[in-house]
Amino acid sequence: MEPLPEFHKLTVQLDELLQAEISSNGRHQQIEEINQLIDQRGDIIHLLDKPVEKEEKVMMEEILAREIRIQEHLEKSFKQLKQEIRMHKKHQTSARKYSNPYDNVSSHDGIFLDQKK
């Protein structure tokens, strides 16, 4: 298959996949699919030549327009994932402090040692 139509097909699939909301339940599978499409596009991008025909130019313009949306969606998803990780860590810390409030109290607090013999 020609590299440009294949690259266009993969770009459309990636854009449609990113348009769908990423749920926390199926996130791992969606991330795997996104990574697979990105890897496939990375393999094909080196084979692309400068478009010569009008049809190829139109296809390339559509690819570039979709590429902008893809980048925006990936950045948004990455920020959302980082925020969820931060909230999860904060929740773990809060839960640990609630279950054991005296965990970080110094053990030497209030001890008097007599130096006399």
Image (tube, helix red, strand yellow):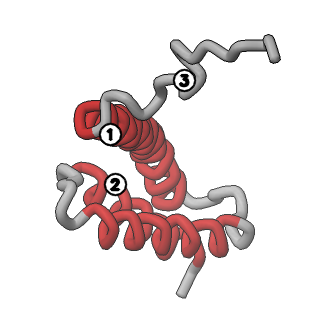
Report the front residue among 17 and 108.
108
**Residue 47 x, y percent position in the rendering:** 71, 72
Residue drawn at 66 percent across, 74 percent down: 43
C-alpha separation, residue under disc 3 versus residue under disc 1: 17 Å
Q: Earlier in the sequence, mark 3 or mark 2?
A: 2
3 vs 2, front mark = 3
Report the front residue among 112 and 34.
112
The residue pinned by badge 3 equals 106
The residue pinned by badge 1 equals 96
User: Is 16 situated above or below 107?
Assistant: below
1 vs 2, front mark = 1
Classed neighbour count for the residue bearing mark 2: other residues with Cα under 10 Å, few (<14), some (14–19), many (≥20): many
Query: Does residue 104 appear in this view?
Result: yes
Q: Amino acid at mark 3?
A: Ser
Classed neighbour count for the residue bearing mark 1: other residues with Cα under 10 Å, few (<14), some (14–19), many (≥20): few
Residue drawn at 31 percent across, 37 percent down: 100
Question: Image check: 96 left or right of 45?
Answer: left
Residue drawn at 54 percent across, 23 percent down: 106
User: Is 85 situated above or below 43?
Assistant: above
Residue drawn at 41 percent across, 71 percent down: 32
Does the residue at mark 1 contact the one at mark 2 (Cβ under 8 Å)?
no
SS at circle 2 = helix
SS at circle 1 = helix
The label number, if any, that marks residue 15 in the structure image: 2
Classed neighbour count for the residue bearing mark 3: other residues with Cα under 10 Å, few (<14), some (14–19), many (≥20): few
Question: Image check: 57 left or right of 45?
Answer: left
C-alpha separation, residue under disc 3 versus residue under disc 2: 54 Å
Q: Earlier in the sequence, mark 3 or mark 1?
A: 1
